[in-house]
Image (cartoon, grey):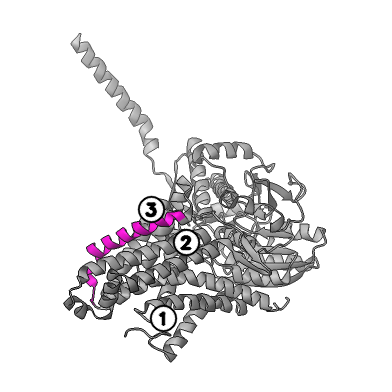
């Protein structure tokens, strides 16, 4: 067997692929981070919400031929509503409760949603064949679906961060996540903020799902891997640190990409977790620090 | 007048009752229960579904023709979720709880490998319809019978055609599970025998969706042939990503998945020129094949895949063995299955003393103009392969 020579081109190609994947991680992780920051709830159902977004895009594309990027206009608001409803009905009971309660509840919700999806749409893998091929720049191939998804993910993450920093509600969310009681004293309706935040987190997950549907297979359990990776990103960037989620996402994508180049495919799966352990040993509060 | 009417009505009911009592008992007799678990969900769901359809079609056909040993046949099928451990539990349940007479195999080598430990423990015959890894039959089991060709020869056609055209280098990737590993190993051995150089070989975890790293490494080596020991979803993902990364081998073949109509339906033109292996194609000159395809399409509203045909063929073989043994006893059925040497809609059947299949032949097909064309072996081929595969930019 020939030894694979790792050239500069290959390296660059994988850095590109890695970052493109990372943008998506950032988007999805931001949603998870928001929910944890504001409500101290670990939302294991985040992946199921992502999956719902993906199926929304798939069905709109399969039945009506709707441009998957346009379907974001449907999936994001829809998932926002779904998230808000879930919060109002179930999650509000475990806000500020011990972490185990929120884990159990959201885990239950995720299983429920995934199985309903399986019953409704079967486990068949679906895909949205909208964009195929790539832009070739010199020696580097930029996969079309990944590049455009990355740009959209970047845009949405940027919008979300702007929202958090420039609008009144956004600031209220950040205030609540910094110190719930003080925020309440300042006149912020924290119950309402909880609902909005969960909806926002779900909307971001749904957006992530819509984007994933263009690149990878859509199936009921697809969300699981994204929950794990979002976790990693949130811890990397610091829990509750929103810009941290963004950079953490990019970093994870990069590390995964490079690892898969230098190691075999199986080991590269493990690398993300090893990286996480190392980071936590060196900087327990996450790379960019966060709230404790 | 009214009296006559009432008498007439009573007479009718009495005769109906007599009729029912006469015919009823045979209809009310216990059906022969055959058990199986199949991957109806999970990564093997696609081929699993076809297998189930094959079983149910067979059940219907047997019952329509009067049943087996004078009784109806009833299949009890559970979903093993493509998980070997779940399958073991389900077969235990089928044998001890549902009290099935005999069992049909699940889909895939890893699941069959695990599930057969249960059937062997209880000395139930398992007709393994969709398992092809040789090592499964090297455990000394006595009640396990193979229907399809072994994994190691899946890509024999690809290697032969490549060698014929003087191609020298080959890259092999495979899912890191039983069947795919065996297929890759077999392909590598065949390639080496033909004097080809294996420039790359790597396994990827089950469930991988991102093949960019693998493909980038392969691209840098520029092999003539790329062979993938795959199932359906990874085959689709790999093909798509080859297009995205502009990877251009002269020939590219996959083991499982390349033969399913969905492979082309999902990807369209991206699937052109891809070679796939098949245990069976509806255009092959096997006995009764046209009738089977027509009747199957009528029942399920789509074409049968080789998984359907294998499931059906295996069920037919078990039924034939039961008929010849004239009994549901495992020892008697086993004796028959070891001796049996008959062609079915699925192809030839004959096993050695391990229950390992030695007669059935595989074919290689290529997607050309949206259609599957059988291109190898020569005596079963319906067309010539289009070679070499043109680079993506030229399509």
- Specify few, some or many for label 1: CA neighbours under 10 Å numbering under 14, 14-19, or 20 or more: many
Identify the residue at image location x=38%, y=69%: A160
- State the image coordinates of residue B327 (x, y, percent, origin top left): 50, 48
Q: Residues within 10 Å of mark 3 (few under 14, many from 20)?
A: few
- Of mark 1 and mark 2, the one earlier in the sequence is 2
Chain bearing mark 2: A
Which mark is on residue A211?
2
Task: Point out residue B28 in the picture as x, y percentages from the top left corner.
Answer: 36, 38
Q: Nearer the viewer, mark 3 or mark 1?
A: 1
Q: Which residues are magenta?
A: A70-97
Q: Quadrant of residue B160?
A: bottom right
**Badge 1 and badge 2 both on one subunit:** yes
Q: Position of residue A182 (x, y in %)?
A: 20, 80
Q: Is residue A86 magenta?
A: yes
What secondary structure is found at the residue carrying circle 3?
Answer: helix
- Left or right of B91, for residue B390: right
- Residue at the far bottom in the pictured view: A282
Mark sitting on residue A237 = 1
Q: Nearer the viewer, residue B353 or B203?
A: B203
Q: Is residue B95 visible?
A: no
How far is the residue under mark 2 from the one under mark 3?
Answer: 23 Å
User: Where is A232 relative to A210, above or below?
Assistant: below
């Amino acid at each position: 067997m020939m030894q694979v020579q790792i050239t500069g081109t290959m390296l660059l190609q994988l850095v590109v692929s890695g970052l493109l994947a990372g943008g998506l991680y950032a988007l999805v992780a931001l949603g998870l981070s928001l929910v944890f920051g504001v409500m101290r709830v670990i939302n294991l159902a985040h992946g199921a919400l992502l999956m719902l977004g993906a199926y929304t895009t798939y069905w709109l594309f399969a039945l009506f031929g709707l441009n998957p990027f346009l379907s974001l206009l449907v999936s994001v608001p829809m998932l926002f509503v779904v998230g808000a409803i879930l919060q109002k009905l179930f999650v509000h009971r475990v806000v500020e409760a011990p972490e185990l309660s929120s884990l159990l509840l959201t885990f239950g919700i995720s299983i429920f949603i995934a199985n309903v999806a399986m019953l409704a749409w079967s486990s068949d893998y679906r895909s949205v064949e909208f964009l195929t091929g790539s832009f070739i720049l010199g020696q580097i191939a930029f996969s079309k679906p990944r590049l455009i998804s990355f740009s959209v993910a970047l845009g949405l993450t940027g919008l979300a961060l702007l929202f958090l920093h420039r609008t009144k509600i956004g600031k209220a969310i950040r205030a609540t996540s910094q110190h719930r009681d003080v925020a309440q004293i300042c006149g912020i309706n924290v119950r309402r903020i909880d609902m909005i935040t969960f909806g926002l987190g779900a909307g971001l997950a749904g957006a992530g799902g819509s984007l994933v549907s263009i690149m990878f297979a859509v199936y009921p359990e697809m969300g699981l891997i994204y929950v794990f990776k979002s976790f990693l990103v949130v811890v990397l960037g610091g829990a509750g640190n929103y810009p941290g989620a963004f950079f953490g996402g990019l970093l994870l994508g990069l590390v995964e990409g490079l690892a898969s180049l230098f190691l075999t495919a199986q080991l590269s799966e493990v690398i993300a977790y090893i990286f996480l352990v190392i980071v936590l040993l060196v900087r327990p509060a996450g790379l960019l620090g966060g709230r404790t | 007048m009214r009296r006559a009417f009432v008498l007439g009505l009573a007479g009718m009911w009495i005769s109906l009752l007599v009729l029912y009592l006469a015919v009823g008992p045979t209809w009310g007799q216990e059906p022969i229960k055959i058990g199986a678990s199949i991957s109806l969900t999970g990564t093997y769901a696609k081929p699993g579904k076809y297998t189930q359809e094959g079983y149910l079609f067979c059940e219907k056909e047997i019952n329509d023709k009067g049943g087996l040993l004078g009784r109806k046949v009833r299949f009890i099928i559970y979903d093993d979720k493509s998980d070997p451990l779940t399958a073991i539990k389900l077969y235990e349940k089928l044998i001890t709880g549902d009290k099935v007479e005999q069992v049909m195999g699940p889909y895939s080598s890893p699941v069959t490998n695990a599930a057969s430990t249960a059937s062997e423990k209880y000395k139930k015959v398992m007709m393994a319809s969709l398992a092809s890894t040789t090592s499964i039959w090297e455990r000394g089991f006595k009640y396990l019978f193979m229907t399809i060709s072994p994994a190691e020869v899946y890509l024999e056609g690809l290697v032969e055609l490549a060698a014929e055209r003087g191609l020298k280098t080959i890259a092999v990737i495979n899912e890191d599970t039983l069947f795919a590993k065996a297929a890759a190993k077999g392909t590598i051995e065949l390639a080496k025998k033909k004097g080809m150089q294996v420039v790359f070989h790597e396994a990827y975890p089950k469930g991988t969706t991102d093949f960019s790293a693998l493909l980038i490494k392969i691209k840098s080596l520029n092999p003539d042939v790329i062979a993938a020991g795959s199932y359906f979803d990874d085959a689709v993902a790999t093909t798509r990503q080859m297009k995205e990364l502009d990877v251009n081998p002269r020939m590219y073949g996959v083991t499982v998945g390349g033969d399913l109509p969905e492979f082309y339906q999902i990807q369209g033109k991206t699937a052109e020129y891809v070679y796939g292996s098949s245990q069976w194609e509806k255009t092959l000159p096997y006995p009764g094949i046209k009738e089977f395809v027509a009747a199957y399409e009528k029942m399920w509203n789509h074409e049968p895949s080789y998984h359907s045909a294998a499931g059906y063929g295996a069920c037919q073989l078990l039924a034939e063995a039961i008929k010849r043994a004239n009994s549901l006893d495992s020892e008697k059925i086993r004796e028959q299955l070891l001796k049996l040497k008959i062609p079915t809609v699925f192809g030839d059947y004959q096993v050695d003393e391990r229950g390992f299949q030695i007669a059935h032949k595989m074919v290689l097909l290529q997607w050309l103009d949206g259609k599957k064309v059988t291109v190898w072996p020569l005596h079963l081929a319906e067309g010539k392969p289009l070679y070499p595969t043109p680079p993506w930019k030229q399509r």
